[in-house]
Image (cartoon, helix red, strand yellow):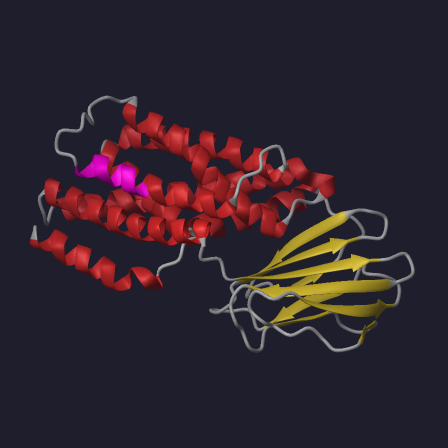
Amino acid sequence: MRAAIFLLLTMLATASSLHAHGMRTAYLELSESSEGAVLGTWRVTVPAPGVAPRLGDGCKPIGDAPRAVAGEPQTVALRCDGGLGGRRIVVDGLGPVLTEAVVRVLRSDGAVLSHVLTPDAPAWIVPTAQSWLGVGRDYVRLGVQHILTGVDHLLFLLGLVLYVRRPRYVFVTESAFTISHSVSYSATALGWVRVYAPAAEACIALSLILVALDVGDPDAQRQSSWQGPLIALVFGLVHGLGFAGALSEVGLPDHAVASALVGFGIGVEIGQVAFLVAVMLGLFLLSRLAPQKLVALSGSYLVGVTGTYWFLQRLWICFA
């Protein structure tokens, strides 16, 4: 009980510094006209001095270069001799502050190309056409990063593990979660479903509270193998709306929509499985040091307190 109280106080002290969907991303969109003019839009999610795009020789700005102001898109007109095909695009300064840059190129013929730049690979040569395999590979990387930096999704998975407990049913439950959120994020990303983003985020936080209550209930019937998958199936639809937010920021390439959606889903699945394996290993080690009930109770406080803070915060945003 002392450990649970300590954990509760720790979460209350640090909750304000936690953010769901902690992607620290820059976005560069280049729209090409038939006359060789290019309109560039540059946006960053957090302040990052020293992070800036560079198009190399042959592209001259018309006016001032874009500045990295958090949350505020900056536009610049460029004149690129010969167009953007075959041109090398670099984003300097990627690292611990901004971990990636998403580049979208809107070609004059209507094609949409996209690529994700990272600190290890900060440059991209714009192809004349991008294969579906290349698009899928980029979106796999994006899916992995999104799930591993989406703290609310990870806490929900932690709650499911604490609720289900048995490894066999953990992965059955995870599969139900994957199927469910894949349906909702695909439908939203394709424009078939439209939701108010702050309301969806509040519902995701509410799902943490509800699963934490089940974990902390000593009378919960965890022996029923269908309960965990059912919870994951229902709340996965809500969490998929959060995944759709990441895709809406990046956009889907017109020529490879299916490849992008499948690649993103594979990336999310890879990240989920890696997290679950780490959690189950950690819980196995903790079970040798502390009673299982104490571990479950502490986990329920971790998930529940954080979810409550986020729920109130996001509910305020909905009605502000």
Would you say residue 83 sits in the magenta stretch? no
Q: Nearer the viewer, residue 227 or 130?
A: 227
Q: Is any atom of residue 267 visible in this view?
A: no
Q: Is residue 212 magenta?
A: yes
In the image, what residue occupies the spot 37% across and 48% down?
A: 152
Image coordinates for residue 219, horizontal then vertical, percent: 13, 29
Taking the spot 49% from the left edge, 57% from the top edge, the residue there is 23
Residue under the point 66% across and 65% down: 42
Q: Which residues are magenta?
A: 208-216
Viewer-nearest residue: 71 or 132: 71
For residue 288, side relative to residue 38 (left or right): left
Left or right for 261, reference 21? right
Horizontal side of residue 311 vs 249, given as left or right: left
The answer to whether 177 is drawn above or below residue 109 in the figure is above
What is the total number of numbered labels drawn onto the structure image?
A: 0
Q: Is residue 232 above or below residue 304?
A: above
Query: What secondary structure prevails in the magenta region?
Result: helix
Image x and y of residue 183, in percent: 52, 31
What residue appears at the point 24 percent right and 34 percent down from the top-left corner? Answer: 163
